[in-house]
Image (spheres, helix red, strand yellow):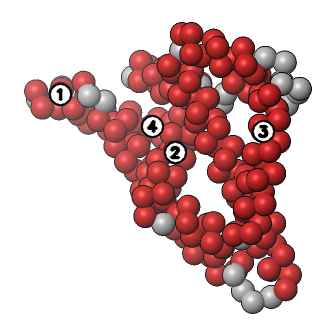
Amino acid sequence: MVAADWIAIAAVAGICALGAFLGFGKGLKFFTDGIFGIIISVFICYCIGGIVLEFDFVQEILNKLTGALTDKNGFCDFLLKIHIDIILYYIVLFIIVQLVRILIVLILKNIIESNNAVFKIINRVLGAILLLAVAALLVLLVFQIIHWIGGSTAAGFRLKLEGSFFKLDKLFESNPLLSLPDRISQAIKLR
């Protein structure tokens, strides 16, 4: 085991303890209010945007939009040049994610914070899971940023993860976030 594994074990234990102490209701409220809610929605759009973009019905709608703007006038050509279809797609996706997030939070918060002994235990367990999931997403985002920086920084970081018992080196190399910008670029090039 390398130092990164020990750091990961300590971080997971601390995060789970904090999540259990706070509970799911408080954690959910904290992570979905105000700017954190917007950041979460943007992050979700970033994660699923490339996947949803590949759906046939989404492609049909975007093709109809670009077809309606094609050969109209100079301003429409400008809109096509800046890929207004992709911009509108992400705006609509963000609005949908915001609405779904608010609805899910409202339902879950009301259920989980009921004054029942079973729900109090579930609240603690789900609090630990929620905080652990948020931490995992942050780790993936940090890995993505380090990958973007590249060069000796990424190579040195990769070397520190080499031989990890928990395969952190493999996670760094095959971060699921790495392929999303490529998918979006390919979708734009296909248009």
Q: Distance between the Cα atoms at labels 4 and 3?
A: 44 Å
Depth order, front residue of 106/91: 106
Query: Would you name the residue on which mark 1 appears?
Result: 78
Query: Would you name the residue on which mark 3 appears?
Result: 8
Residue type at mark 3?
Ala
Q: Distance between the Cα atoms at labels 1 and 4?
A: 21 Å
Q: Distance between the Cα atoms at labels 4 and 2?
A: 25 Å
Query: Mark 4: few, some, or many residues within 10 Å (few <14, many ≥20)?
Result: few
Looking at marks 1 and 2 on the same chain, the residue that comes earlier in the sequence is marked by 2
Depth order, front residue of 100/60: 100
Can residue 44 be seen? Answer: yes
Q: Distance between the Cα atoms at labels 1 and 3?
A: 49 Å
Query: Would you name the residue on which mark 4 appears?
Result: 60
Q: Residue furthest bottom?
A: 115
| Quarter where residue 142 is shown | top right
Depth order, front residue of 136/9: 9
